[in-house]
């Protein structure tokens, strides 16, 4: 525990959230409140072809707004995706963004709105030190965020993740002005998500909550949000996986996703530092990778987190033992069809040393409860490849 007599820190909490079935109809009103009259809808090609996007467009046009769609977002977005969106926004005089989709679309939407007013390259604003102060805040366009998956929680975040294709690394671009003005959490927009994506995005939300809860530092509000977010995932994810139109379960997952992203201002850890390089190099789903490596990281971090995990297990109604919690994570992974190893997900074993060096440089590595170096991260990769948990619990 930190010395509270001398501790000075900063806590931040998210944007305005409208939650509930049918709240997508309020998208136009949310734009008006944010001063947006010519929104650019940023989404991905798959969503752009679905009736879901028509519900968003109908709400915007019904409010008398002039709307266009940019659908050039790939699953692991690159700087080129952002540049393309900025060009359209500037060319056609859009004064704000409505980001619709999963984490990739939400991140690109926020980054398009951010970069629309900047003259420096995007990498100048990587989340290192105070680089965010280089930005011109007057040019940042307002954002309305409409998630269609429950995983990243990007709708309540002040950053976007984008891949640098020249180095095959994921980088975090941060600025307080990127926070959406309103997040619309409508469970009915997530009912079309297939089971495998429901599972992968749900494991992303779970990883956010657990890593935030276990991160070092004093942030009791984040801890409380992370603990309840964890409980919601364990309660709702199996239901949402089995029954895609279970609106209650879908709503709980949307809430848990936003809670995880709210809580991880406290920190993340090795789950994310391991997943980011693999996702960037092999273009695999981030949440899927988080679900695979989470148990291995829990076992590795056990000496530093065991007491915390006991408390979290008790909150979930489990025996207050580390083994009980780890087994619950493994069972959730089995129930939702998440592979047990990286090898089963198609990750080759020939570049693990290179990936470990990349993971060591990832900004999330610094807040892992157990100090990390490339050797430890390579060991974790090898365990996640072979299925070896450093615990008596079988994978």
Image: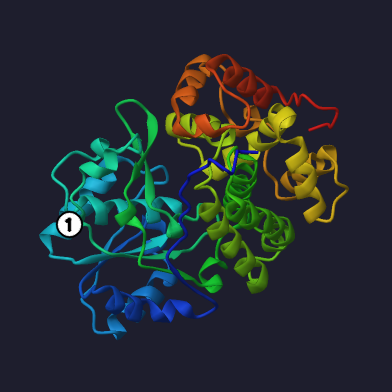
Of residues 131 and 18, the one drawn nearer to the viewer in this rendering: 131
Q: Quadrant of the N terminus?
A: top right
Q: Is residue 268 visible to the viewer in this orientation of the structure?
A: yes
Horizontally, residue 331 falls left or right of residue 176, namely right
Counting labels gives 1
Residue 45 vertical placement versus 286 (above, below): below
Mark 1 Cα within 10 Å, few/some/many (few <14, many 20+)?
some
Horizontally, residue 57 falls left or right of residue 184, namely left
Residue 375: % across, % down: 58, 14
Q: Quadrant of the C terminus?
A: top right
- The answer to which quarter of the image holds residue 34 is bottom left
Residue 95: % across, % down: 19, 67
Of residues 244 and 24, the one drawn nearer to the viewer in this rendering: 24
Q: Which residue is mark 1?
A: 139
Horizontally, residue 66 falls left or right of residue 313, namely left
Of residues 267 and 205, the one drawn nearer to the viewer in this rendering: 267
Element type at mark 1: helix
Furthest residue in direction front, as rendered: 5
Residue ID at (34%, 45%): 174
- The answer to which quarter of the image holds residue 373 is top right
């Amino acid at each position: 525990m930190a010395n509270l007599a001398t501790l000075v820190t900063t806590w931040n909490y998210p944007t305005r959230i409208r939650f509930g079935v049918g709240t997508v109809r309020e998208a136009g009103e949310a734009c008006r409140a944010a001063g947006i009259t010519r929104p650019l809808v940023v989404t991905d090609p798959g969503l752009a072809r679905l009736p879901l996007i028509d519900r968003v467009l109908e709400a915007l046009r019904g409010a008398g707004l002039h709307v266009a769609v940019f659908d050039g977002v790939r699953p692991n977005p690159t700087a080129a995706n952002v540049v393309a969106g900025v060009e359209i926004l500037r060319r056609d005089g859009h004064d704000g963004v409505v980001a619709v989709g999963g984490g990739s679309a939400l991140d690109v939407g926020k980054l398009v709105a951010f970069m629309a007013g900047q003259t420096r390259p995007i990498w100048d604003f990587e989340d290192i030190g105070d680089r965010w102060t280089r930005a011109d805040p007057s040019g940042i366009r307002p954002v309305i965020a409409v998630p269609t998956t429950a995983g990243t929680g990007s709708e309540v975040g002040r950053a976007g993740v984008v891949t640098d294709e020249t180095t095959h690394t994921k980088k975090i671009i941060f600025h307080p002005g990127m926070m959406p003005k309103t997040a619309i959490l409508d469970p009915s927009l997530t009912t079309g998500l297939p089971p495998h994506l429901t599972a992968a995005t749900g494991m992303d939300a779970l990883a956010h909550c657990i890593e935030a809860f276990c991160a070092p530092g004093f942030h009791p509000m984040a801890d409380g949000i992370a603990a309840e977010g964890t409980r919601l995932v364990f309660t709702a994810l199996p239901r949402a996986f089995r029954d895609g139109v279970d609106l209650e379960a879908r709503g709980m997952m949307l809430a848990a996703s936003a809670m995880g992203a709210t809580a991880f201002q406290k920190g993340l850890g090795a789950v994310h530092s391991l997943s980011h390089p693999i996702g960037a190099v092999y273009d695999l789903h981030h949440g899927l990778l988080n679900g695979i490596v989470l148990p291995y990281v829990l076992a590795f971090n056990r000496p530093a987190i065991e007491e915390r995990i006991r408390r979290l297990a008790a909150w979930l109604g489990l025996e207050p033992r580390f083994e009980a919690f780890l087994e619950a994570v493994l069972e959730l992974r089995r129930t939702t069809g998440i592979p047990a190893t990286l090898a089963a997900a198609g990750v080759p074993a020939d570049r693990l040393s290179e990936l470990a060096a990349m993971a060591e440089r990832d900004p999330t590595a610094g807040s892992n409860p157990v100090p990390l170096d490339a050797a430890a991260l390579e060991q974790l990769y090898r365990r996640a490849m072979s299925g070896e948990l450093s615990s008596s619990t079988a994978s």
